[in-house]
Image (cartoon, rainbow, N blue to C red):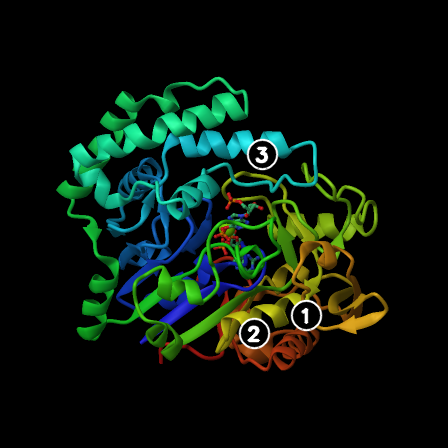
């Protein structure tokens, strides 16, 4: 049995919490893409864990796998593992030998490119973790993989090939003076020692084989997506995307298991009951003025409904886990979710943050878009066309703030009626059952209608 957890929107939908909720019943939790750009929150008995690389199943003591589709910054990985150990957990993390490694020069190049783009509409607003440059090297067949850290001769040779190229790119193309991030000798020493620790702790695996063997032994596996469908490099709003495939297909290519295994299991779309976005790019249902530096979009929505945006941002604590940036806020966008449901083939939904919307007079949903006088129900293929879309809203009566812990104890019928109408609309439009409703950040603050593992 496998369950794939996928972000249906723009990231930060509450994937970590859902992995934690259902993770107790599985044996292995595997990440299949992304790197330490992710920030997944698990709240257990009031204790909050923010995880960027270690799979969220670690909080429940599950075996965690970073699949071949991930990009791994070993420095972050070991820091996170050490931190969790200090907090009394004992994370068992296996890393795919085929996964690519993030080096300090990738982070520098990520920052340089963002700086160069900063005066134009092209700035993505990345997390600055070197994600894009590392996937570029992977596709360019000059990347360094986890297995290479275990072979010191090979590691040196690969660094000697790639680092001078990166240095020339930074200095000659971008005109930026480089520092120790481009020093082959020190990179070699640092990353060789990461390789030694990976070997000492027996952490590396051929992920596809490892997971196949676990499944053959009867283990259940959960695939933990990072980011979300609309920032998928293929299915998102390019170029304001991350550089990997958070969509469900990525769970096969990013772990080495077949599409049949992933598709034969459940695929749960995680939906935030409204929208948030940390980086640049259009957001047709955006509320209020744009916060942070989002070039090219500062005219959209300025001043309009700022109070509602501010209310949701504060109630939901909508500040980036990785970067601390205030998140942009919008109403739920159904064309986006229809696109997401089609791309991922959701078998069920978890709708989070219903509590955050309480005490509003009314709650709106972008039901469709107007584009060139035509009503459309899904997202156009280009970002330029998407930013031309004007949402057609449906309005729902608001619901009161209630004791959400009691609601979680009592079950679905205890959810305020207007909120249930909202949930049922989403489920009907996507023709997909709601498996769970998040009514607070804690593990217990969830109303479970159906457990995909039972
Ligand atoms: P992820 O990246 O998808 O794992 O999500 P994040 O952890 O970045 O952001 C989700 C935030 O919302 C975290 O602070 C969660 O603890 C919190 N959260 C998750 N579900 C709910 C919910 O149903 N209600 C509320 N109020 N907070 C939630
Ligand atoms: P989780 O897993 C929300 C966004 C960045 C930027 C774009 C590219 O916590 O949901 P990158 O550093 O990946 O090259 O940045 O993607 N982004 C996320 N937004 N949640 C995330 O992860 C994100 N990871 C990247 O803000 O717009
Ligand atoms: Mg997050």
How many other residues sit within 10 Å of disc 2, few (<14), some (14-19) or many (≥20)? few
Identify the residue shown where x is 55% and y is 44%: 320
Please tell me which residue lies in front, 445 or 227.
227
Left or right of 428: which side holds 41? Answer: left
Residue designated by label 1: 378
How far apart marks 3 and 1 lie (CA) works out to: 30 Å
Number of disc labels: 3
Residue designated by label 2: 342
Looking at the image, tell me whether mark 2 or mark 1 is earlier in sequence order.
2
How many other residues sit within 10 Å of disc 1, few (<14), some (14-19) or many (≥20)? some
Q: Is residue 364 visible?
A: yes
Q: In this picture, is 247 found above or below 39?
A: below
- Tell me the quarter of the picture where residue 56 sits: bottom left
Looking at the image, tell me whether mark 3 or mark 1 is earlier in sequence order.
3
What SS does tag 2 mark? helix
How far apart marks 3 and 2 lie (CA) works out to: 32 Å
- For the residue with label 3, is its CB less than 8 Å from the closest atom of ligand 2? no
Identify the residue shown where x is 30% and y is 23%: 184
Identify the residue shown where x is 40% and y is 54%: 33
Q: Give residue 296's mark.
A: none
Q: Give residue 114's mark.
A: 3
Please tell me which residue lies in front, 368 or 290.
368
């Amino acid at each position: 049995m496998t369950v794939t957890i996928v972000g249906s929107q723009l990231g930060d939908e509450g994937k970590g919490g859902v992995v934690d909720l259902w993770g107790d019943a599985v044996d292995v939790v595997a990440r299949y893409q992304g790197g330490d750009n992710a920030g997944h929150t698990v709240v257990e008995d009031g204790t909050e864990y923010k995880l960027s690389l270690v799979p969220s199943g670690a909080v429940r003591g599950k075996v965690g796998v970073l699949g071949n589709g991930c990009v791994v910054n070993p420095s972050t990985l070991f820091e996170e593992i050490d931190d969790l150990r200090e907090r009394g957990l004992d994370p068992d993390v296996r890393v795919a030998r085929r996964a690519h490694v993030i080096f300090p020069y990738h982070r520098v190049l990520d920052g340089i490119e963002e700086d160069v783009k900063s005066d134009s509409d092209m700035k993505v607003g990345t997390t600055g973790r070197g994600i894009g440059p590392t996937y570029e090297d992977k596709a360019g067949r000059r990347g360094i993989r986890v297995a290479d850290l275990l072979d010191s001769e090979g590691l040196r040779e690969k660094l000697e090939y790639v680092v001078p190229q990166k240095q020339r790119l930074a200095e000659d193309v971008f005109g930026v003076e480089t520092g120790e991030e481009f020093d082959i000798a020190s990179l070699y020493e640092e990353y060789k020692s990461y390789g030694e620790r990976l070997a000492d702790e027996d952490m590396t695996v051929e992920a596809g084989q490892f997971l196949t063997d676990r499944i053959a032994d009867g283990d259940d596996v959960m695939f933990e997506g990072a980011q979300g469908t609309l920032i998928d490099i293929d299915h998102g709003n390019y170029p304001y995307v991350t550089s990997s495939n958070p969509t469900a297909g990525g769970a096969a290519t990013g772990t080495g298991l077949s599409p049949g295994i992933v598709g034969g299991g459940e695929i749960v779309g995680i939906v935030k009951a409204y929208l948030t976005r940390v980086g640049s790019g259009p957001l047709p249902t955006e509320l209020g003025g744009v916060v942070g530096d989002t070039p090219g979009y500062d005219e959209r929505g300025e001043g309009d409904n700022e109070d509602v945006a501010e209310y949701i941002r504060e109630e939901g604590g909508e500040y980036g886990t990785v970067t601390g940036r205030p998140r942009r806020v919008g109403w739920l966008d159904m064309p986006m979710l229809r696109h997401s449901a089609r791309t991922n083939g959701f078998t069920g939904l978890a709708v989070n943050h219903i509590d955050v919307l309480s005490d509003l007079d009314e709650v709106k949903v972008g039901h469709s878009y107007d584009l060139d006088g035509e009503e459309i129900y899904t997202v156009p293929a280009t970002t330029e066309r998407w930013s031309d879309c004007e949402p057609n809203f449906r309005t729902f009566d608001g619901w009161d703030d209630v004791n959400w812990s009691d609601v979680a104890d009592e079950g679905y019928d205890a959810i305020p009626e207007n909120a249930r109408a909202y949930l049922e609309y989403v489920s009907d439009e996507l023709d997909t059952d709601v498996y769970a409703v998040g009514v607070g950040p804690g593990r217990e603050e969830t109303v479970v209608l159906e457990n995909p593992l039972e």
